[in-house]
Image (cartoon, rainbow, N blue to C red):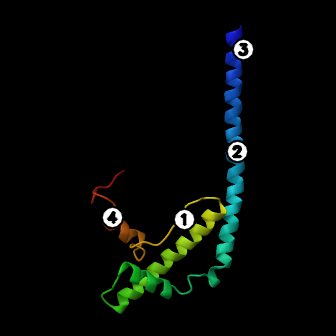
């Protein structure tokens, strides 16, 4: 009888822990999504007055830091536009992450003037043309 009672208490305790974990996750999920939605609205409303300005100054500083040069003006304009899009994405995600309590931030690196496709084509490891299904 004593063993049976202990088993029942353990099962009840485990069930309560699972229930509490589920309830906590549900509460955090709905709270987190509303915080993320609010951060997204703030980002959209501040887009016109963003610290990104037109991207020129940030791109120049980035070029100097990473010693980047381009073959011609056309290539530089293309890369500046991609850089600006990446910078805007970084700022948006950092705002959303801060609002939702995440502790990491995104930042610029030496690949910040590449599109996702360009980066993937040259830095996705040793698989080459092998496609994983």
Q: Residues within 10 Å of mark 1 (few under 14, many from 20)?
A: few
CA separation in Å, label 3 and label 2? 28 Å
Q: Nearer the viewer, mark 3 or mark 1?
A: 1
Residue 52 in the image, given as x and y percentages of width and height = 56, 82
Q: Which of 52 and 33 is in front in this view?
A: 52
CA separation in Å, label 3 and label 4? 59 Å
Q: Residues within 10 Å of mark 2 (few under 14, many from 20)?
A: few
Residue 123: quarter of image = bottom left
From the image, tell me which residue sits under label 3: 5
Judge from the rendering whether residue 85 lies leftward or rightward of residue 118; answer left or right. Answer: right
Which residue, as the protein is rendered here, is positioned at the far bottom?
73
Q: Is tag 3's residue or tag 1's residue first in the polypeptide sequence? A: 3
Location of the N terminus by quadrant is: top right
Residue drawn at the location 54% of the way across and 65% of the way down: 105
Q: Is tag 4's residue or tag 1's residue first in the polypeptide sequence? A: 1
SS at mark 2 in the image = helix
CA separation in Å, label 3 and label 1? 50 Å
Residue drawn at the location 34% of the way across and 61% of the way down: 124
Q: Nearer the viewer, mark 3 or mark 4?
A: 3
Q: How crowded is mark 4: few (under 14 residues within 10 Å), some or many (20 or more)?
A: few
CA separation in Å, label 2 and label 4? 39 Å
SS at mark 4 in the image = helix
Q: Mark 2 touching mark 1, by CB under 8 A?
A: no
SS at mark 1 in the image = loop
Question: In the image, which disc is placed on residue 105?
Answer: 1
From the image, tell me which residue sits under label 4: 123
Q: Is tag 2's residue or tag 1's residue first in the polypeptide sequence? A: 2
Residue 36: quarter of image = bottom right
Total labels drawn = 4
Residue drawn at the location 44% of the way across and 86% of the way down: 60
Q: Is tag 2's residue or tag 4's residue first in the polypeptide sequence? A: 2
């Amino acid at each position: 009888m004593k063993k049976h009672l202990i088993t029942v208490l353990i099962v009840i305790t485990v069930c309560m822990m699972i229930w509490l974990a589920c309830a906590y996750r549900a509460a955090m999920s709905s709270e987190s999504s509303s915080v993320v939605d609010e951060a997204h609205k703030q980002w959209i409303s501040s887009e016109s007055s963003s610290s990104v300005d037109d991207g020129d100054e940030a791109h120049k500083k980035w070029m100097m830091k990473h010693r980047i040069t381009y073959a011609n003006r056309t290539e530089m304009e293309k890369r500046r536009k991609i850089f600006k899009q990446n910078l805007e994405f970084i700022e948006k995600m950092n705002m959303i992450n801060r609002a939702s309590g995440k502790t990491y931030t995104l930042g610029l690196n030496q690949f910040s003037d590449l599109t996702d496709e360009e980066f993937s084509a040259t830095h996705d490891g040793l698989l080459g043309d092998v496609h994983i299904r």
